[in-house]
Image: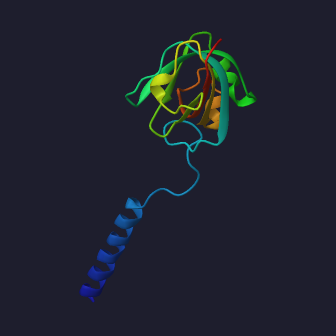
Amino acid sequence: MIKAILVVGAAAAAIAASASAAPAKGKPPVTGANCKPSIAVVLSWKLASAGSATLPFSLLVNTTGGNHAAAAWRKVSQQLSVQVTSATSIKRNGDHASAHLAIGDRVNIQARACKADAAATVPPPLTATRITAHPTH
């Protein structure tokens, strides 16, 4: 009888330990580092800094427009920093090299963001998924 109680108690303790080690179920957070980006942010800007051959790096840009989801980033009065990684697709006059991005280029930057971050008064930094650049004439 005592052995049966000990076995049942040990089994219950093992089940409780495995349940606490399991990942949390449910929806991901709506903002912050672990949120799942759900909106596309499209920005039209002019570059204020040149590209780099070493990845990752950040571009400084001056805002001139964008889609509705980009309103929080358009309202920022200073130059914004956009991260460029190895996963970022870059196109500039048929060239795909990030080092050929030049100051003053007209760019269309596409990124993903969480919906709650887009409503924030101070928007978080963006990581570009696609950059299309055109030299100024």
Tally of numbered discs:
0
| Residue at x 48% of width, y 56% of height | 24
Q: On the picture, is 53 further left or further right than 41?
A: left
In this orientation, which residue lies closer to the viewer: 23 or 64? 64
- Chosen colour scheme: rainbow
- Quarter of the picture containing the C terminus is top right
Q: Is residue 136 above or below residue 6?
A: above
Q: Quadrant of residue 44?
A: top right
Residue 80 in percent (x, y) is at 55, 17
In this orientation, which residue lies closer to the viewer: 96 or 23? 96
Q: Is residue 74 above or below residue 96?
A: above
| Residue at x 41% of width, y 30% of height | 56
Residue 135 in percent (x, y) is at 61, 18
Q: Quadrant of residue 72?
A: top right
Residue lying at the far left in this picture: please name it: 3
- Quarter of the picture containing the N terminus is bottom left
Residue 50 in percent (x, y) is at 48, 17
In this orientation, which residue lies closer to the viewer: 32 or 37? 37
| Residue at x 48% of width, y 40% of height | 87
